[in-house]
Amino acid sequence: MQKVDTKTKILNAAEQLFAERGYADTSLRLITSQAEVNLASVNYHFGSKKELIQAVLARYLEVCAPSLEQSLAVLNKSDVPFTQHDVFNCLLAPLLELNTFRHRGTSIFLQLLGRGYIENQGHLRWFITTHYGKVLTAFNKAVQDANPDLSKEEIFWRLHFTLGTVVFTMASSKALIDIAKADFDVDVDIEGLIKRVVPFISSGVSAGGTLP
């Protein structure tokens, strides 16, 4: 069995606890206890709790951001009009790729991302926009091009509501999969779950009408 280094032990323990408990309710002592390392090792490898949180997200973003950027580049260069459904479909492969990186990687990443908004972790927004600004710009351009009648403010609200829907769905994915099997005798995996939610959130983002 390959030996896991101290830094990886900390990241593995931190991501699990952050996803389950949230960032604010997870102490460094709890992380080091689960990782079976000393507190000084966190400071040595990461410097602070904020930097540890960023490193946990970065592990996932480094996997999915390049493929998402490539998919969006193809879409944004298209001469054929595309829909919001097409934009969200660009997310499918990069997100599912996270399951090959980590067990339940897709669900964990979306929970971690959602908690960043729920708990108002402003440093995470700064970190993501600073280090992954190019792919965010490409995504926002695609959403705007797919919805030319919506203002930037309206798109902000609708994408925020979308994130809430996706995070809740992923957080309750096991229960939803079990219910689908028990009530409808349907076998659904994470990919199937995401494919079911995409038409719903696409319609929500592109729905007509704004506040008067």
Image: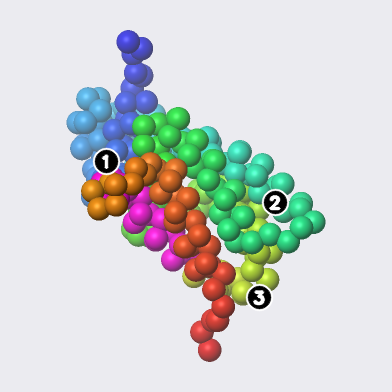
Q: Report crowding for label 2: few under 14, some 14 to 19, many 20 or more residues within 10 A (C-alpha).
A: some
In the rendered structure, find residue 69 and report the number of the disc placed on it: none
In the rendered structure, find residue 75 and report the number of the disc placed on it: 2
Say which residue label 3 marks.
149
Residue 47 visible to the viewer: no
Q: Please tell me whether residue 33 is drawn above or below residue 159 in the rendered image.
A: above
- Left or right, residue 181 beside residue 137: left
Q: Amino acid at mark 2?
A: Leu
Check disc 3 and report its element: helix, strand or loop. loop
> Residues at badges 2 and 3 in contact (C-beta under 8 Å)?
no
Coordinates of residue 166 in the picture (x, y in percent):
41, 56
- How many labels were placed on the picture? 3
Q: Is residue 195 magenta?
A: no
Say which residue label 1 marks.
17
Coordinates of residue 120 in the picture (x, y in percent):
37, 60
Magenta segment: 159-180
Q: Residue furthest top?
A: 1
Check disc 2 and report its element: helix, strand or loop. helix
- Left or right, residue 212 beside residue 38: right
Considering depth in this image, is 192 or 54 the residue closer to the camera? 192
Which residue is drawn at the image coordinates 48% and 39% (left, top)? 96
Check disc 1 and report its element: helix, strand or loop. helix
